[in-house]
Image (spheres, coloured by chain):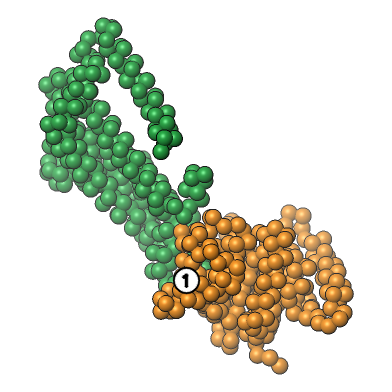
Amino acid sequence: MKTAAVAINRLSYSYAASDGRSVLALSDVSLVVEQGSFVSLLGPSGCGKSTLLYLIGGFLKQEGTAIHVDGVPVTGPGPDRGIVFQQFALFPWRTVLGNVVYGMEKQRVPRAERLDRAHKLIRDVGLAGFEASYPSQLSGGMRQRAAIARTLAVDPAILLMDEPFGALDAQTRGIMQEQLRQIWQATGKTVIFVTHDVREAVYLSQKVVVMSKRPGTIKEIIDTSFEGSEADARVQSAVEDIWQQVKLEFADAPAHA
Amino acid sequence: MARLNVAWLKRLLPIIGLLVIWQAVAASHVTSAFLLPSVVTVAERVWSDIASGTLAGKVGLTLYRALAGFLIATVAGVTVGLSMSILPVVRWFFDPLISVGFPTPKIALLPIFMLWLGLGDETKIAMITFACFFAITTNAYAGALGVERAFIWSAQMLGASRRQILTDIILPAATPQILTGMQIALPVSLISTLVTEMIMGGGGLGGGLLEASRYADSPGVFAAIVEIAAAGAIVINVMFALRKRLLRWHEETQTRDQ
């Protein structure tokens, strides 16, 4: 049995809507993410999959100790859990280099070392030559590469990815998926990946967590770590399987959701 | 370079047109030289003001007052505006004050300022600061409130402290809107300076205008207006250039460059 990077035990979460009503977003969610594994959270929009990710990240406050990371209850954000957003969230007033070094500045990494590491990371994600560019001068794919480099710069043990390729065109998305797979294999980081793209989830992850519509619960956890000669066929059948499940959720969902 | 000059000429054309009409009307004897002195007379007066150094003195004094008030208001307004966005107690205190103070014509408080602070530069600068404060504060506050959640979360995740989030994230993210507030406040500072100088005296462009009108020096009044307009235009353009420089990372700068 591998050690748990993230352990969630019977987590419920509600928030106050704009009209003051309390909305139950997540209900009785329990999940264990093993160290070094790649897990996708999949479900219809509004199912609370991003909320779950933000709770693991410590960005949203919750009472109690339902979430443990490395055995310690989550109380707030930290560099052990790096997040990557769909809309990149690069600091637009900083250059690519300025964005990538920011976390290391805050961690008080010596100047020479942080520049060294930043240049290497920027090369690794394929942005060499764009160190001095501002995010507004880059394409969507390049921005997301820069955002990933910025997050990797603080060397988080866990990568939280919130539909990171959702804003990219199909071709760029394919390239980025491949690159993320390589990063994951090379670094052995734990990845929790939120998506509503079934194929993406199955292709990238070892486990797909299918969530129900609001209030979000875990419907099923499907093993998708296929290897060997029949992998392609099994990926295909898993995609179809999961599609059926997700389609059911969509069909049940109220029309306005 | 040549293209730049053409662009400038095109920008100046309406002003040149206005001057031509002015000169034509003044020369046509529809009015008297007292009611409307000719462009040439006024230009000669402006030139003699420049040559004698009196203009530099007046402009210097007026700009000193305007910019002192403007800069104090900027520091105070940005501090208060950003604090309002993160500290509920500051928001609780300033929110109603701003609601009442923003639509009030600030110049109405000048008699009180004169009573409390006397007739010197302190009163003028205090008046100008007060007049500029509201536009800068409300814009800084709105800019800070509009900062994307994901920026703040990213900085938290990367290890920034609360203080660093304010200085590293909220301040630069709110800069476009802070600059907008400053651009609204800058003409207000010039107007307030002129009005305080015209009411209180004490030299400067407003004082000069007041003096010329007292002596029924019609070319002097028109020359003062031209000088005030020119000084204002230069200050506003410097502010515009400053915005472009500070926001060279921003999309608005990039599209304008193309």
Q: Is residue A116 visible in this depiction of the protein?
A: yes
Residue type (three-letter) at the residue carrying disc 1 = Val
Question: What is the x, y in percent for residue B132?
Answer: 30, 45
Residue at 75% across / 68% down in the picture?
Answer: A200
- Horizontally, residue B137 falls left or right of residue A23, namely left
The front one of A14 and A3 is A3
The front one of B120 and B219 is B219
Asked which quadrant contains residue A110, the reply is bottom left
- Horizontally, residue B214 falls left or right of residue A155, namely left
Drawing shade for chain B: green
Where is mark 1, residue-wise?
A: A101
- Split into 4 quadrants, where in the image is the N terminus of chain A? bottom right
Q: Residue furthest bottom?
A: A1
Residue at 18% across / 24% down in the picture?
Answer: B45
- Horizontally, residue B78 falls left or right of residue A77, namely left
Question: What is the x, y in percent for residue B169?
Answer: 44, 63
- Split into 4 quadrants, where in the image is the C terminus of chain A? bottom right
- What chain is the orange one? A
